[in-house]
Each structure stands twice: as C-alpha cells, then as structure tokens.
Image (cartoon, rainbow, N blue to C red):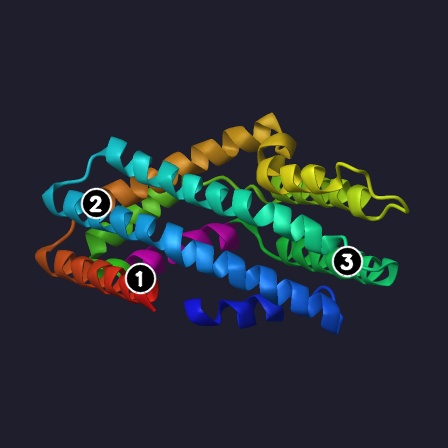
Amino acid sequence: MYNNIDWWIDWYVDDYVELSKQQQKAFDAALTELHDWHRETQLPEYVNQLISLKEQVNRGITEQELVEHQEAVRVHWKTLMTKAAPEIAKLSKMLTKEQIKDLKGNIEKDNQKKWREFEALSMKEWRKERQDEQIQDLKEWVGKLDDKQKAKINELSLGYQRTFIHWMEYREQWQGVFFDLIDNEQLSKNYVLALSDLMINGRDKYRTDEYLEISNANNKVAQSIMLYQLTNLSSKQKRKFNREIENLIEDLTDLITD
C-alpha cells in the first residue's frame, strides 16, 4: 500500500475536487517528492520506535514508556504536516473558483452525512461499537483475548466519552477559516504561511477547552487499555505480538531500501 500511496491519495482527493491535467501533474510531482522524503527520513524513525516498543513489551512496559510512545506518534504526525503543509498550500493556489465551489459543496455534503450518522447512533450503540473496536484492534496484534481480558477491556472502555459534537464544531470552524483564506479574490501575500499554519497548528488553536479536556481523558482511557493488555499477555499472545511487530519492522525496512 505504501508504494501505491499516490493512487490512494488521488482517489481520496477525487471525492472532493476534480483536478485539471496541469494541476494533477503538479500534485503528482509534489507527492513524489514528499513520498521520497518520508521514505528516507521518517520510516527509519518508525522502525527504531517499533524495535524499542518490542523490547519494552517483552521485559514489561511501563505506563511512562507507553505515554512516550504516544507522544512520539504525535511528533511523527506534526513532522509530516510541517513538511507537507507548505506544498499543499502552494498547490491549493492553483484551484479555480469553480473548483473551490465544488470543494465547499462536497465538504458540506460530507459534514451533513456525518451528522446524520451521529444522530442515528444511540449512546448504547456507540459504547458497544467502541468496546468491539478495542477488542478487534487488540486481537489483530495479540490474537484472541480470553474472557477475563475481554471483560476488563469492556470495563475500561466505559470510560470513553463521546466527542463527536465537539469534533464537528472544531472541524466546521477549521473549514470556515480555510475557505476564508482560499475563497478570496486576492489571496493574501501571507496565504501560504497562513494556510500552512492552519494545517499544522489549527487542531491546537480551534479545539475548545472542553474538547481538549475530554480528548485528554479519552487518551488516558486508551493508555489504560493498552497498558493492561500489554502487561497481561499470555505466552501465545506475546508470540503473536512479536511476530506482528517483526513483520512490520521487516516491511518498513524493505520499503526504506526499495
């Protein structure tokens, strides 16, 4: 999938806006450059983190070490966005008024769909989905959970709080700022910097204090679930975990040398 990321991104972009041949050529060139940078500089970082995680889990990972891994993931994402955002901002200057109109309309449709799905899902159904997702995600890494583990994961999952309304309010505010920047007869001289900042730092700027508080609480729930499972692995589950990590390390190492 990694080597075909350009196809996946093209497919995703096409859901929102149709690019001209000239725009597509510029987009592909920028994506190729970003892809090469990511392969050369970021994949080795991921490999090192996975090696560290495997060693820690096998000798008994601590809560602090798990927190550090989660922080490292956030740093990886910020590093990627810091590199990609200026190029995305430059490419967005090529969009026509008609394309911007289509983009806005498609995003609004997407938002409406998300609201409908939210309204159709009861709190009880949402909680069940979260519990099932947690168990399924863990199963992919460690294999089948026993009844005691499932019961504990279900119990801990009850601590999750629903953030959809907060997330959508943030999302719509972010989109509003984005369209204020791009849907302008005369783009600001600082347009690229402003849009880059929005993409890199908008998540921190436009989430409310309440949203941040709930998100932090949910992160702690996720940490408690991971810590419980990774420190309560059976011998069979630990072997499965090690195989999965080793396979991922091997795949990433192969991609680096491709």
Q: What stretch of residues is rendered in magenta? A: 124-140
As measured in the structure, the alpha-carbon distance from the residue carrying label 2 to the one carrying label 1 is 15 Å
The residue that appears at 84% across and 60% down in the rendered structure is: 96
Q: Is residue 67 magenta?
A: no
| Residue 252: mark in rendering | 1
Residue at the far top in the pictured view = 209
Of residue 81 and residue 158, the one placed in the foreground of this image is 81
Nearer-N-terminus badge (1/3)? 3
Instruction: Check the picture and name the quadrant holding the C terminus.
Output: bottom left
What residue do we see at 22% from left, 56% from top?
Answer: 147
For the residue marked with disc 3, what is the amino acid? Met
Q: Is the Cβ of the residue at disc 3 closer than 8 Å to that at disc 2? A: no
Q: Secondary structure at mark 3?
A: loop
Is 135 inside the magenta-drawn segment?
yes
Q: Quadrant of residue 104?
A: bottom right
Picture coordinates of residue 130, whole percent (x, y): 44, 52
Residue 216 spot, x, y in % from top left: 46, 32
- Residue under the point 41% across and 37% down: 219
For residue 94, which numbered disc appears in the image? Answer: 3
- Circle 3 or circle 2, nearest the eye: 3
Q: Whole-Å distance between the Cαs marked 1 and 3?
A: 34 Å
The main secondary structure of the magenta stretch is: helix
Give above or below for 2 relative to 81: below
Q: Is residue 18 visible?
A: no
- Per the model, the C-alpha gap separating discs 3 and 2 is 43 Å
Q: Quadrant of the N terminus?
A: bottom left
The answer to which of 101 and 115 lies nearer the viewer is 101
Rendered image: mark on residue 52: 2
Q: Earlier in the sequence, mark 3 or mark 2?
A: 2
